[in-house]
Image (cartoon, rainbow, N blue to C red):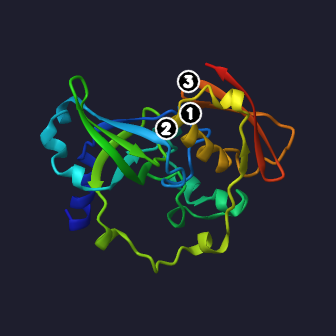
Amino acid sequence: MTPLSIIISIFACMNIEPIAFFHSPLTSKFGIPRQSGLTASLPGRIVPEPAYRHEEAVRGLEAFSHLWIIWEFSANGRQSSDASRHLTVRPPRLGGNERIGVFASRSPFRPNRLGLSCVRIRSIEMTDGEGPVIYVEGADLMDGTPIYDLKPYVAYADAHPDARCGFVDQKEWQPLHVEFPDALARLFAADELKGLMEVLAQDPRPRYHDDPQRVYGMPFAGRDVRFRVADGKLIVCEVVSL
């Protein structure tokens, strides 16, 4: 066998299992932030699988402020074996109607469905039933997402303030102004409401939707948040328990 065929054989036999699962108030793909960090107050929990429910697994992690998460776009379903179908994608930042190469994008539709996110660590709590639970903020993962690895963020190697960012540098994005009636806002706890407001400001709608009369529904923390968008303003119309 050639060296290349040996490497391919090794990866074909590699079995990757989740080391944890993510828990979030966002229970569907609709409304998930398009990048980590955009909704800095959005809470989430990383709950390890039984084999890693030991304090030793996170020893020293409390000294770091941020964390890299390697995870799976599990809600996308199994993609076709015809990889050519996913060689190009339509990024939301380009309005959802201009195609670029999949490897020049942060699209969730990728050959191996792997995601990479950087989040802020809020706290790490040792529990009796779930082991060391990591509480984070700013994740772009939906509830139930499998996690395959965790690595601490280190600024000297991970931060590149002079980096060029392609089409992202050329397309400015403005968040929406959110109007949330007090009577509806009081249905959420303070930390939930802050994260929800940030999610709504990012405009959860598909980029090609622009009907000011259409009412959308987004599940969040056990409730369906219904809203419409017009003239750069998102107006919450109703909140219904699920």
Which residue is identified by label 1?
28
Q: What element carries label 1?
A: loop
Foreground residue, 23 or 189?
189
* Pointer 3 with pointer 2, Cβ within 8 A: no
Q: Is residue 174 left or right of residue 233?
A: left
Foreground residue, 68 or 112?
68
Foreground residue, 169 or 177?
177
Q: Is residue 62 left or right of residue 179?
A: left
At which x and y percent is residue 167? 62, 72
Which residue is identified by label 3?
222
x 41%, y 75%: residue? 160
Residue 203 sits above or below residue 53 on the image:
below
* Pointer 1 with pointer 2, Cβ within 8 A: yes
Nearest to viewer (mark 1 / mark 3) = 3
Category of crowding for the residue at label 2, using alpha-carbon neighbours closer than 10 angstroms: few (below 14), some (14–19), many (at least 20): many
Which residue is identified by label 2?
142
Mark closest to the chain's N terminus, 1 or 2: 1
Q: What's the residue type where badge 2 is placed? A: Met
Mark 1 vs mark 3, CA separation in Å? 11 Å
Nearest to viewer (mark 3 / mark 2) = 3
Residue 127 sits above or below residue 38 on the image:
above
Category of crowding for the residue at label 3, using alpha-carbon neighbours closer than 10 angstroms: few (below 14), some (14–19), many (at least 20): few
At which x and y percent is residue 92? 66, 56
Q: What's the residue type where badge 3 is placed? A: Gly
Mark closest to the chain's N terminus, 3 or 2: 2
x 29%, y 48%: residue? 149
Question: Quarter of the image containing the N terminus?
Answer: bottom left
Answer with the quarter of the image where residue 236 lies. top right
Question: Quarter of the image containing the C terminus?
Answer: top right
